[in-house]
Each structure stands twice: as C-alpha cells, then as structure tokens.
Image: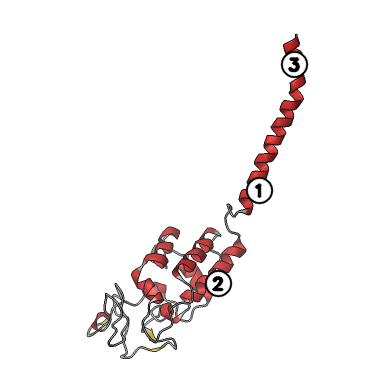
Amino acid sequence: MRSARFSLRQFPFLILFFFVGLALLIWQAGLNTSRGDTAPSAAESMAAWDKVATVVQHPRCLNCHQVNSPRQGDEQRLHVPLVVRGEDNLGATGMRCTNCHSQTGNNPTTGVPGAPHWSMAPLEQNWQGLSSGDICRQVRDPARNGNRNAEQLVSHFTEDHLVGWGWNPGPGRQPVPLTRAELTEHLTTWLAGGSECPQ
C-alpha cells in the first residue's frame, strides 16, 4: 500500500518532467532553426542568384556564351580575327579555337588566353542578349545546361578548369567579381532555396 501511495505521489512529478523535457526539445529545435538548419527561403535564393548573376553576366563568361562568334576583352569587342562557332563549338575549318588558344593556360608572350577544352559554350547555353532571369531559367534547366543536376551544376562552376579561367584571365583582363568560394556559397544557397529566378 505504501509503495502504491508513493507511486501516486510521484505521478505529478513525472508529468512535470515530461513537459519540461518536451519544452527543452522544442527550445533546441528553435535554436537549430535560428542557426540556419532549415533550407534558405525563396527570397534568400533570389538574393543568392543576384550574386551569381554578377559572374555569369561578366565578360569573362559572357564572351564565350554567344550565338555565333565569341567576344574579346572587358569591352566585349568582336573577336579578331573573326571566328564562328562551327559544328563542334571549336570554330570553322581553318579557323579553329585551338589554332591560337592553348589547352594548358594563358600565353605570357602573346597574351592569348587559354585553358583546358577552350571552346565556345554550346549553343543551348547561349547567354547573348539574355536577361539575368532568362539566364537563371536556362542554368536550372537540364535540357539547356548540359544535362546537369544541382550537384553537377555546383561542380561545373566550382571545379571545371575552363570556368576557373575566369579567376585567372591573364594581364589586361578583369577576373570575375566574386571569389570561387563565394560563388560556390551563393550557388548552393540559390539551389537549396528552390532555384528562384527574377522575371
């Protein structure tokens, strides 16, 4: 009988401990949320794209994401000598990209830029005349981004050697405005927040 009375007396304390424990779990969940353990919002995704756009709309990228002929320099002048895309994005017969552009890096003597697999971007990845929103929608569309999923997009922007040339374009050319680490961070936030695009 005594043990039964003792158990009944302890019952309110058990309930109290239960609710205190539950409150602690809820509080901890709130802390995790405030630390950024949730996905970025649509607004954060859009803001991240605005940062990514400063790179993709920079001449270092835009000069080769053209319809028919690449551009040159920060002022995006027409390529001299005049070259055209060709069937494989490497120029027409007799005027191939590799005639002048090294696959190993910039030429310090002539100033001609170079990087592995130097070429124009595929036609479905043309950015000539497109708005930030149009480029955004193209980049997130596997049918127009080289059939890349989110993970492959991040890898392309952060590991591809030709893309990396944008940070080491050689004398007389401005590099893209973000560091590669910053671009990776903004690209990841954009994708995690739903790949939001401006109109």
Q: Earlier in the sequence, mark 2 or mark 3?
A: 3
List the residue tagged with mark 1. 30
Residue depth check, mark 2 versus mark 3: number of the one nearer the observer: 3
Instruction: Determine crowd level at label 2: few under 14, some 14-19, many 20+ residues with C-alpha closer than 10 A.
Output: some
Task: Please tell me which residue lies in front, 50 or 96.
Answer: 50
Amino acid type shown at disc 2: Asp
Q: Are marks 3 and 1 in contact (CB under 8 Å)?
A: no
Q: CA distance from mark 1 to mark 2?
A: 29 Å
- What residue is drawn where x is 71% and y is 35%? 20
Q: Which mark is residue 190?
A: none
Q: Whole-Å distance between the Cαs marked 3 and 1?
A: 37 Å
Quadrant location, the C terminus: bottom right
Is 185 displayed left or right of 97 in the figure? right
Label 2 sits on residue: 50
Question: What SS does tag 2 mark?
Answer: helix
Q: Callout 3 environment at 10 Å: few (<14), some (14 to 19), or many (20+)?
A: few
Q: Which residue is mark 3?
A: 6
- The number of numbered badges drawn on the structure is 3
Up/down of 107 relative to 81, above or below: above
Image quadrant where residue 59 sits: bottom left
Q: Which of the marked residues, 1 or 2, is nearer the chain's N terminus?
A: 1
Q: Residue at x 59, y 64 (%)?
A: 44
Residue at the (41%, 75%) spot, across then down:
167
Q: Amino acid at mark 3?
A: Phe
Q: Earlier in the sequence, mark 3 or mark 1?
A: 3
Q: 3 or 41: which is nearer to us?
A: 3
The image position of residue 159, as x and y in percent, is 38, 65
**Distance from Cα at disc 2 to Cα at disc 3:** 66 Å
